[in-house]
Amino acid sequence: MAIARPVRVLLFAAAILWCFFLYQVFQPSSGLSGPGERYVNFERDPNLDPTGEPEGILVRSSERYAPDAVDNDRANATLLALVRNSEADEMVASMVDLERTWNSKFNYPWTFFNDEPFSEDFKKKTQAATKAQCNYEIIPKDHWAVPSWIDQQIYDESTAILEKGGVQYAKMSSYHQMCRWNSGLFYKHPALQNTRWYWRVEPKVHFFCDVDYDVFRYMQDNNKTYGFTLNLYDEPKTLPTLWPETVKFLADHPEHLHPNNAFKWLTDSERRPAHNKGAQGYSTCHFWSNFEVADMNFWRSQPYEEYFNHLDRAGGFFYERWGDAPVHSIGLGLFEDKSSETLVINIFHSSTARIHPNAVVA
């Protein structure tokens, strides 16, 4: 019995779709490319981590956290953002998320930094997003300018090589300046002189989960130095001489190395041997500093200050593309007690906010 033509067409189309489906399922993986490539080094899905509140002292919201409370329970802390006027809407989106999930209960002040004056439009929009105090600060020119010891010809030649090698933002001077400022200058700003704790918040980030305790007080009351969300591997092409310069510094200042350091984590060569080789002995494992909660007293300490000054004079923030994330991570791994560093809040990748009291060593 002959099959009607319309039925034959449908069967043929169904066969084609089925073959396409099988191809999509069983085709060889071509690997990830683009910005998402860095996430292939996840060894597990952070979403699968157990959630819940941390052990230790937790301080809840109360009337003593009202915006106008004089005798309040707030720690000496601020929410900190480096942001441009053109990013006002993206900054407000981040603020709305964090205010909804956390800061509306605790009303910590916001401190915004820019290398040029903030516009009235920026101030109006950000002030409308919070009941807390907003501070608008200009970065001193000597903190943002390219240092006098950077040779422009060497910079041009080295960044051209980086760009040819596929290093993102290699020729963007403002990116190099930002990395340097975030690494060792932001906490020297006069506006932060009497402030100890900060929570770094960037434009276009999202906070999905409610946090019902004072994060800054948790850090303070439980003797924590640094909080982060993700621990990733960096691109070795951006920092080939960062670790050799670090070794030079340690040779001159062995007294700064903490007895309970995370040297093994910083120099691990088993999990990503190619990274260790490309970075000349550094694992490239680092805390993702786009989100960090930290004690500025650590950055102000003699070991870290001298370390940053050594790196700054070496020129790698400009001749290479040393980021504040690996610089912060190496500083913490060498000069801080690893038991006091803890994964603080993973509210980007979890259905509920959480604190993990785990040591930083992988």
Image (cartoon, grey):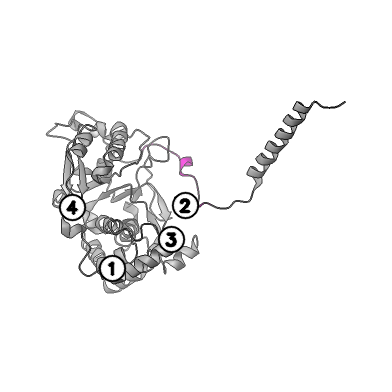
The residue indicated by pointer 3 is 166
Image mark for residue 181: none
Q: Examine the rendered structure and indicate whether residue 159 appears above or below residue 83.
A: below
Element on which disc 2 rests: helix
Visible residue check, residue 31 = yes
Disc number lying in front (2 or 1): 2
Local crowd size for mark 2, using a 10 Å CA cut-off: few (<14), some (14–19), many (≥20): few
Q: Quadrant of the N terminus?
A: top right
Image mark for residue 139: 4
N-terminal-most mark, 3 or 2: 2
The residue indicated by pointer 1 is 315
Q: Is residue 275 left or right of residue 67?
A: right
Disc 3 versus disc 1: distance between alpha carbons?
A: 20 Å
Image mark for residue 34: 2
Where is residue 354? Give x, y as percent.
38, 39
Disc 3 versus disc 2: distance between alpha carbons?
A: 11 Å
N-terminal-most mark, 3 or 4: 4
Q: Determine which quarter of the picture holds residue 10.
A: top right
Kind of residue at badge 4: Ile
Visible residue check, residue 242 = no
N-terminal-most mark, 2 or 4: 2
Q: Quadrant of the C terminus?
A: bottom left
Judged from this view, the residue extending furthest toward the left is 70
Q: Is residue 198 left or right of residue 31?
A: left
Kind of residue at badge 3: Gly
- State the extent of the magenta-drawn residues as a range: 32-53
Local crowd size for mark 4, using a 10 Å CA cut-off: few (<14), some (14–19), many (≥20): many
Element on which disc 4 rests: loop
Pick the residue in front: 343 or 164.
Answer: 164
N-terminal-most mark, 4 or 1: 4
